[in-house]
Image (tube, rainbow, N blue to C red):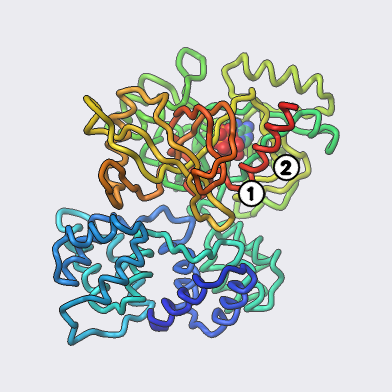
Amino acid sequence: MLFREFAELCDTIEKTSSRLAMADLLAEVFPTLSADDLPIFVRFSRGKIFPDWSAEKLGFGPGLLYEALAYVIGKKRETVVSAINSSGDTGRVVEGLLEKREQTMFFSEELELLDVHSRFVQMANTSGRKSQQERMRSAQYLFSNASPLEGRYLARLMLEEMRIGVGEGVVREAVAKGFAVPEETVEHAHQALNDLGEVALLAKTNPSALAEVHITPFRPVKMMLAQAGSIVGMVETHGSVAAENKYDGSRFQFHKVGDRTAIYSRRLEEMTKSLPDVVALLAAATNHDVIIDGEVIAMQDGKPMPFQTVLRRIRRKHDVAEAAGAISMQPRVFDILVCDGETLIDKPLSERRRILESVMKEFVAPQMVSNSPEDIERYYHAALDDGNEGIMLKVIDSPYLPGNRGKLWIKIKPEVDTIDLVVTGAEWGEGKRAKMFGSFLLACQDENGDLLELSRVATGIDDAMLAELYELFKDKIIAEHGKTVVFEPDVVFEVGYAELQRSTNYAAGYALRFPRFVRLRDDKDPSEIETAGSLARRYSMQNKAGQ
Ligand code: ATP
């Protein structure tokens, strides 16, 4: 397939607002694609270059993009930057600049979808001293051979943000329609494979195998998540439920086959080198080949430590040895997804729990099963007294649903109104803080993953954190207008607030009253931030509570 055809289809989809129409369009195209093109097409349509289970990154920031483009259009980098500053939609600006390009390319070749993909893979895989140069060369090659419309989507792919409104749901629907397989089968295969590209390929080449897919070791799957809820509500609906501590730590998924082991973070990044002690503890605790779900906590003198402090140390890679020595990292495991080659996610929690207890000699998180709200309430207070965040309540016969945030897992914790939002920009500070960002612009997401701005936050950030934030954001600047900076939306803040108010000042239609920075949530991916739907629910709950 030519990249031009891909770009034209994206343009058509971008002009379409109905999800159904988008799915229909994709369903028509999918069966016509070759087995090589299909998975790439599927990933590209969602702005992904690699499968979701892979933490591989293109390593191509906005800075390189501007430079490559400036070279190709024969203009200064500043010209590109100022055009982007006055728009904000990098893709459209690139398109406009390519339209005006002075040097016509005599030897321009038609780009193939596969060619674009392999250039991206090369970009991701280069390392060492010359890697930036090599990435630059690949980007120059791509832009020189791109038509303006192709340029729009090349730029967006490089920033891994397609802005055409195609989410996971649309692709799943399209695969189901295009290859005439039930949508539940597609969804199930997607949960296990964690790559819609591969799911689409299977649907094309071997649809009967879709229902049989297994979780593959060393390809992490998304983690199951929880909603807020109440003890009484859970017991009324389900009778007996399983209660566990909600540990204040960091989520992990541990994979082991024979002597090979790996541990992944909630964002599915491999953390094996950063958590060697935890890996060793887990590996020694079982003789089986397993994929296990749990939380790592930091203990000092037998007590859990606030995890954020520890996490920061882990992240500074050179401090690993020191961090491991001073504080002990301890796993708590609460679920098992695979045991000795058998995928267990469809089995009920009670059964998985039994298997977990039989294969792990240590570290299984204690669990209480009860239908008494009073007993669970007592369990909750004991959990808080022990330094935990609260408790988790889980439906005993529930399957493990990767990536699902449903009502099967409920979290109970003290009422604090905080909200996770992505940082989309900032303003430079004043006075002695002039060289740092002073206030940050925050956004939630709509159902397509498009960002809606909601508030600014400046309170609650001390000098040390401001300096850390400067380091974190300085390479994420996409554009600058006077004192205002636009960031690649990549970093999640947890923000506290007093009240949610209706507002016409922000695209989300709400604003936070007295927003205050609580902490960085770098264990969270921007796709996990607050949605417009849950914001509306918060607003109506808040108003009900006030009546
Ligand atoms: P919060 O912001 O309240 O920490 P969250 O948004 O990180 O929640 P949730 O899905 O709401 O994520 O809560 C589940 C998280 O709680 C898990 O990702 C995990 O890190 C943590 N956790 C701690 N103990 C448990 C447990 N026993 N079972 C499941 N998750 C647990």
Q: Secondary structure at mark 2?
A: strand
Q: Mark 1 near ligand 1 (CB under 8 Å)? A: no
* Label number found at residue 431: none
In which quadrant is the N terminus drawn?
A: bottom left
Q: Is residue 320 left or right of residue 287?
A: left
Q: Secondary structure at mark 1?
A: loop
Q: How many marks?
A: 2
Q: What residue is at 62 percent from the left and 63 percent from the top? A: 189
Whether residue 60 is visible, yes or no, is no
How far is the residue under mark 1 from the one under mark 2? 9 Å
Q: Is residue 495 above or below residue 426?
A: above
Residue type for callout 2: Leu
Q: Quadrant of ligand 1?
A: top right
Label 2 Cα crowd, 10 Å radius (few <14 / some 14-19 / many 20+): many
Q: What residue is at 58 percent from the left and 68 percent from the top? A: 17
Rendering coords of residue 493 (x, y %): 45, 36
The reply to whether the C-beta atoms of the residues labelled 1 and 2 are less than 8 Å apart is yes
Q: Is residue 544 left or right of residue 191?
A: right
Rendering coords of residue 192 (x, y %): 60, 58
Please name whichever residue, 226 or 55, is drawn nearer the observer in this view of the structure.
226
Q: Is residue 278 left or right of residue 57?
A: right
Q: What residue is at 38 percent from the left and 70 percent from the top? A: 153
Whether residue 236 is visible, yes or no, is yes
Please name whichever residue, 182 or 527, is drawn nearer the observer in this view of the structure.
527
* Label number found at residue 408: 2
In which quadrant is the C terminus drawn?
A: top right
Instruction: Using the rendered view, name the quadrant where residue 277 is placed.
Output: top left
Label 1 Cα crowd, 10 Å radius (few <14 / some 14-19 / many 20+): some
Residue type for callout 1: Asn
* Label number found at residue 404: 1
Q: What residue is at 44 percent from the left and 27 percent from the top? A: 308
Q: Is residue 133 above or below residue 402?
A: below
